[in-house]
Image (spheres, rainbow, N blue to C red):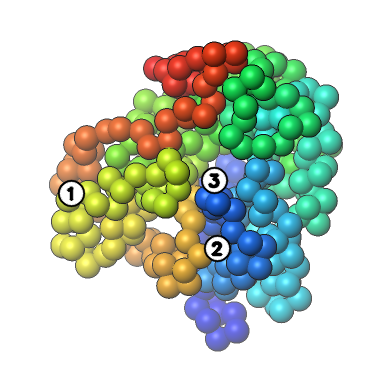
Amino acid sequence: MAQNNQVVVSVPTDINTGIPVIGFGTSSDPPADSKTVKTAVIQAIESGYRHFDTAALYHSEQPIGEAITEAINRGLIKSRNELFVTSKLWCSDAHPQHVLPAIKETLRNLNMEYLDLYLIHWPVSSKHGIHEYPIKKEDFLPMDFKGVWAAMEECQKLGLTKFIGVSNFSSKKLANIMATATIPPSVLQVEVNPCWQQKKLIDFCKANGIFVVAYAALGAVGTFYGTNRVMESDVLKQIAKEKGKSVAQVCLRWAYEQGIGVVVKSYNKERMKNNLEIFEWELSEEEAKKISEIEQSRACLGMDYTSPYGPFKTIEQVWDE
């Protein structure tokens, strides 16, 4: 498929949700300026990305919306319907009465009539009206899981989003949601990479029809919580060298072979393209086994979501470990 004399990679999609298995992330630390985000999203569309991930917290909703409008006007895509757009409910709006206003604000920012996927960003609430990160320790509140999820369901019933899901939830917290849900979560977005493989959580999600989308698939290098252990892994470097691929491509191919999606962020045009070039080759059984034996540790500890005043006093409580 060619557009503007450029070959565009066709990305496979999840059979149940239609999510393209590789998405383009727009979370930056610190947040990128609007012009940078807009330019990157247009380049990503040109390269073949069709899934775009944002959140109320990222300050990237508006430039994504502007980029998509420009991409349509330039003929890069025919309509917004060709894209899958994900956004997230921030903790300060994670209260039953504030979910609907929050998604409407997100849609205004994006200049869209609907989202494809709306996620609860973290399994904790904070005082309404204080939209900030990090959240002050005294502002944390327990989430009313039943009430917030019912409001998420209402968003879907009203056609404001096609699918609803959660982010940074453990299997136990997912089970809490499912216990009262009339519409179960379609997606869990969570850290997954060769150094934090989340096999039990992925198995739990597959057994319950929940599609896992990985963030920090390359270790989130450059963020305050990121790690270079993924990109500097001797095992991954050796496999990449033997296959004539980059470490990033090996990581993304590994994730694809786990039956999950990934959201990967790079504003570098060449790396954008390279990150899509993972579908015409595969890892051998021996290579997959070597990756499965990599020592495991989490990059995103979630320390900022612990508080002596909130529901999670330790990171073990955040993740139910």
Q: Residues within 10 Å of mark 3 (few under 14, many from 20)?
A: few
Q: Is residue 312 above or below residue 244?
A: above
CA distance for labels 2 and 1: 28 Å
Dot 1: what SS? helix
- On the image, the x and y values in percent for residue 138 come to 64, 19
- Decide if residue 58 is in sight here: yes
- On the image, the x and y values in percent for residue 104 come to 82, 42
Residue nearest the viewer, comparing 270 with 212: 270
Q: Which residue is mark 2?
A: 49
Q: Which residue is mark 3?
A: 15
Asked whether the residues under the numbered discs 3 and 2 touch, taking CB atoms below 8 Å apart as contact, a structural biologist would say no
Q: Earlier in the sequence, mark 2 or mark 1?
A: 2
Q: Which mark is residue 235?
A: 1
Dot 2: what SS? loop
Residue found farthest to the bottom? 5
Q: Type of residue at label 3? A: Ile
Q: Is residue 163 above or below residue 96?
A: below
Q: Type of residue at label 2? A: Tyr
Dot 3: what SS? loop
Q: Which mark is residue 98?
A: none
Decide if residue 150 is on the left or right side of residue 212: right
- Decide if residue 117 is in sight here: no
